[in-house]
Image (cartoon, grey):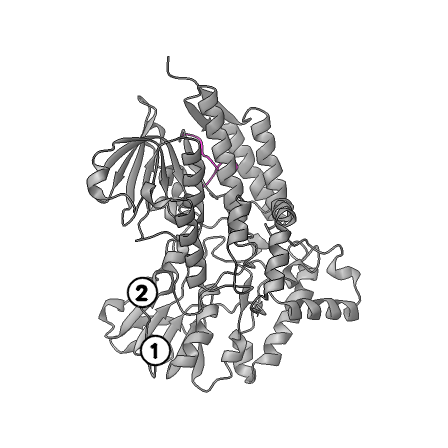
Amino acid sequence: MALNQSKNNEVNHLDAIVIGAGFSGMYMLYRLREAGLSTRVYEAAGGVGGVWYWNRYPGARCDSESIYYNYTFSEELYKEWSWTSRYPEQPEILEYLNFVADKFQLRPDMQFNTRITSAVYDEGTNLWHIQTNTGENVTAKYFITGVGCISTANVPNIKGLDHFEGEWYHTGHWPHEKVDFSGKRVGLIGTGSSGIQSIPVIAKEAGHLTVFQRTPQFSVPAKNHRYDPEFIRQTKENYAEIRRHMKESVAGLNATFGERSVLDDTPEQRQKVLQASWDKGGWAILFAYNDLLGNEEANKIVADFVRSKISEIVDDPETAQKLTPDHFYGTKRAIIDTEYFETYNRENVSLVDVKKAPIQEITSKGIRTADGEYELDTIVFATGFDGMTGSLFKIDIQGRDGVSLKEKWENGAATRTYLGLATAGFPNLFMITGPESPSVLGNMPAAIEQHVDWVMDCIQHMQDNGVDMIEANNEAEENWSKHCRELADATLYTKTDSWYTGANIEGKARGFQIYVGGYGPYRQICDEVAQKGYEGFSLRVLSK
């Protein structure tokens, strides 16, 4: 049973406070507790799961193959759990995380339905003072954020939403009970990953579905399928090899980029490679060649291949044209789908281009664009998240001299970290998959395990050596941020507007806050920093 409020008042100091009970917070709690440190996880939701607690929309599923989308720190755990399919849906992922919480008895040190509102570092005591929305005050030596990179839902500020007489939902905060779309006129805003996953499912149930699209997206078939028992058996036997590949690979998967440039192949060879990748499904096309994300000419060839598939699948040429992207392939979140483009061949689905005819307001009866009004019973916002910094900025985190994280990072315009793990001026604060780490450019559980292990090793080093404080140095931070920018600017990522760059949030400063060098190389850098006595950090002994 999780901590309750009456017990909370009895405890006012802990070794560590962790925010979030998703993949990050659960594993961080496990490691801290195994080391004998008193720890509490605070979670705003009513249970474990993180983003998978909230993302219950129709069609929600992961886009990393399930045999990699899990913890690998425990061979016993890996072999006890069996996934049913290549890309499992949200209920199965949430069931897995509950299974983990039960197996390791994590809930007694978790407090649900509680949001941390502020975390203030006290230089005099070298403690973090934590306050919650329930009025609770707790102090801790270590403050660790596991809030996730894409967990703060973005509801667009559209005039008139409060006057809408029907029901409206956001994919990032979906009700626990089933939403009935039967026979209803549904309007869905947004065609990012959550929109592309939910549109085919909602279309099968709704009387009519109107999709309001601002930016068309590239998407490739997931080719999802159920696993047969023999495949599961072989996977479990290969646990050690799979774990090694995940640690060393560029994206935390058993996948590597092709050995050749797109330009090295003849048109016939390229067509064969790309068709085979399309037929395989998932992220195969993204890894088919080695220069897709750095060479404009190479990218155009692959992008044109995917564009040709859209025109082949969608019957109506005008609709196909509306669905055809004009940006670089793979520079937004790589999306995979199940019958997304095929859905536009249904008679009960229509597509509205809101870049051409913008949404002006939401009326009592529906949505009005520059071209007219669409009467609706239900509106679904599939408008994504305030990524990378959004969840951190929702908490008033103050470091030295009362400077807030939001102030230091200039509301996202000057975000800078050291390794994506720490930031100068905020001692003993660790960020799991924070800005300027590889994080979302791959398989998140793999990134999370690496970060948690590094943080725990660092804390253990401090405990073993009587170190009271660790803080990133300004110079190391500036150099790391510069390195991240230089790597990103050598790719096509920074030439595309996306939630990676903050372009989906009105008024948000643009910037690419992700390390693009790959999971494996990043792991080596972090390990070298630790091996050199935590180079780039200041470690101090304060107590006598």
Residue 20 located within the stretch drawn in magenta: no
The crowd level at tag 1 (other Cα within 10 Å; few <14, some 14-19, many 20+) is some
Q: Spatial distance from mark 2 to mark 1, Cα to Cα?
A: 13 Å
Q: Is 353 or 341 nearer to us in this picture?
A: 341
Instruction: Tell me the kind of residue under disc 2.
Output: Pro
> Which quadrant: the C terminus?
top left
Residue positioned most to the top: 544
The image position of residue 290, as x and y in percent, is: 70, 55
Q: Which mark is residue 526?
A: none
- From this view, report whether residue 146 is shown above or below residue 499: above
The residue to which callout 2 is attached is: 175
Instruction: Tell me where residue 288 sits by quadrant.
Output: bottom right
Q: Which residues are magenta?
A: 414-425
Q: Is residue 41 left or right of residue 335?
A: left
31 is higher (above) or lower (below) than 221: above
SS for callout 2: loop
Residue that label 1 marks: 181
Q: Is residue 81 visible?
A: yes
> Nearest the camera: 245 or 72?
72
To which quarter of the image does residue 226 belong? bottom right
Of 296 and 398, which appears nearest the observer? 398
Residue 514 appears anywhere in the view: no
